[in-house]
Amino acid sequence: MTDYFNYDVSYVMNITDIDDKIIKRARVHHLIESYAAAGHTREKVIADAEAALKKFNAEKIANESCSLKRGAMDDIFGKCKAALEDYKKAAAATPSTEFCKTFSEPLGNFLDDQFGHTIVDNAIFNKLPRFWEEDYHKDMAALHVQPADILTRVSEYVPEITDFIKKIIDNGYAYEAEGSVYFDTVKFDHSEDHHYAKLVPEAFGDLEALTEGEGVLSEQAHGKRQAMDFALWKTSKPGEPAWDSPWGRGRPGWHIECSVMATAVLGDKLDIHAGGVDLRFPHHDNEIAQSEAYFQCDSWVNYFLHSGHLTISGCKMSKSLKNFITIKEALTQYTARQIRLMFLLHSWRSTLDYSPDVMDIAIKFEKTLKV
């Protein structure tokens, strides 16, 4: 767009480093590292591993209704059980570090249930997202993808987020309840100049999607006026990062962060807002609502571009299903140019299935190009 059409583009990338899944994973990662470095006796490691595996089977596998996810969990269970038997047979001096890494899924959850509430240092929660952010930038550089002009991180915009929320409250579209702040979707939708769920109107009332958007650490909200209201600010529980706010120690909700960071850099109007098609509702619809409530306007973004999903041999990529391939792995089989051509030969808004057949098409097309 900049080189061919000579458009003046300010490319801003928002990095989510405060999120329920990230918090849980960072906490578990820290507990596993600490456990492995603690020098526990062999007997304790074996006893904890057996208890963790039993708990994983009883609480995770037994309660999983999705057959694909359950199959993946069964696979984890089998590998961990075999690793435990090998560890029992190994020499007494065998270090437990590698064993703990192999056992990280059941052992991590086992430790988190016992000690997760003791993790209070915000720096612990920053370590994991910084690692993966750096890894992402390395992958993009390997694919020759131009970096963003401006990079923003949620953890660096907390004061701006609390100010943004205060104005939404002052404008009458949000309310405080027991240390958290919620967006009033009904009042917003009933106002003359607004309506909620612009991108996916049929999703209004989809509590399952909205609950998923609230995060895996969110519990039943007390003081919430309507089930469709979503969190702008969450009171932090033990074992979660926390910042000072007018409503007490807490952390930003997922949706508010993008509105605030984009506004801080680009002002009161965005031309193009991009993201995956799965973010249309509730994430992007909530961004629109809270931004319009803040600016008292009826349009915040001119164009939304929602890209299609990437699947692997017909199945959605998922860490839990163990069917994903990393960019580093793909680059051992194909060149960056061939991978880029694969994407360019496909509609950006449709599902793209990554497979050897699709890559063969890209390789054949590459041969028709002038070098």
Image (cartoon, grey):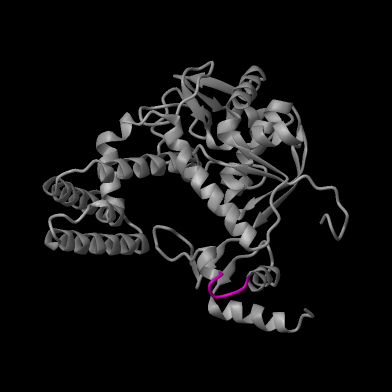
Between residue 101 and residue 346, name the one nearer to us: 101
Q: Position of residue 32 (x, y in %)?
A: 31, 45
**Count of all numbered marks drawn on residues in the image:** 0
Instruction: Identify the image quadrant of residue 82.
Output: bottom left
Q: Position of residue 163 (x, y in %)?
A: 63, 21
Between residue 150 and residue 232, name the one nearer to us: 150
What residue is rendered at 37% in x and 39% in y? 27
Q: Residue 341 colored magenta? A: no
The correct choice, above or below, for 134 with respect to 293 in the image is: below
What residue is rendered at 32% in x and 31% in y? 117
Q: Quadrant of the N terminus?
A: bottom right
Residue 89 placement, left or right of 135: left
Q: Main secondary structure of the magenta part?
A: loop
Q: Position of residue 293 (x, y in %)?
A: 68, 28
Q: Quadrant of the C terminus?
A: bottom right
Residue range (magenta):
331-335
Is residue 40 in view? Answer: yes
Instruction: Identify the image quadrant of residue 61.
Output: bottom left
Residue 135 placement, left or right of 263: left
What residue is rendered at 50% in x and 43% in y? 129
Q: Residue 333 colored magenta? A: yes
The correct choice, above or below, for 355 with respect to 300 in the image is: below
The correct choice, above or below, for 365 with respect to 205 in the image is: below
What residue is rendered at 41% in x and 41% in y? 26
Between residue 309 and residue 26, name the one nearer to us: 26
Is residue 196 in view? Answer: no
